[in-house]
Image (cartoon, rainbow, N blue to C red):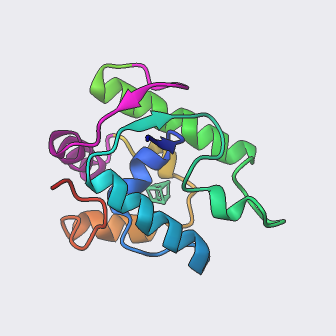
Amino acid sequence: MTVRLRAHHLLCMLTFVGEGYTPAFTANYVSIARRLSSGEEIEMVSGPDDICAPLLAGTTAHCHNASVIARDEAAAEAIGRLLKMKISDGTRIIPDKTLLKRLRRNFALGTIRKACGACEWSELCGHVAERGFKDVLVAAR
Ligand code: SF4
């Protein structure tokens, strides 16, 4: 199996501490965090992914919004530049310790956070980074 992620969720997975939009969304995300922590491969997708899934039935799902698609593009560009690889539909990435450490270091430095600009969670994610990513749920073993 692979974990299907849209590009900006490569950033969100770095700071996830169990907060989310709804109880179902959070429960699903916790389960995905476990899979990523165990090293399950990520498959990049465009549009809604495994993290978005519980929100899609609702009438207020923002997952198809242009602003969220722009967020994916910004994240793919920044992370691709960092990792010197093209992040697009079908790209596969192993979330190992080295990758998570490198992404978190750059997230904390602000070099890959353009996508976070207008995100409502930006303050929380900033605090998580400032605290050295303490209590995050995606942690390579
Ligand atoms: S600020 Fe928003 S887009 Fe950025 S990592 Fe946090 S939740 Fe994801």
**Closer to the camera in the image, 104 or 51:** 51
Q: Position of residue 7 (x, y in %)?
A: 50, 39
- Residue 57 colored magenta? no
User: What is the magenta range?
Assistant: 86-111
**Closer to the camera in the image, 12 or 106:** 12
Which residue ends up furthest to the right in the rendered image?
A: 59
Q: Position of residue 81 (x, y in %)?
A: 35, 24
Residue visible at 46% across and 43% down?
114
- Residue 100 colored magenta? yes
76 shown above or below 69? above
Residue visible at 56% across and 39% down?
72
**93 lies left or right of 29:** left
Residue visible at 43% across and 41% down?
1
Give the quarter of the image for residue 37.
Answer: bottom left
Residue visible at 46% across and 34% down?
43
Give the quarter of the image for residue 82.
Answer: top left
Q: Quadrant of the C terminus?
A: bottom left
Q: Position of residue 85 (x, y in %)?
A: 35, 19
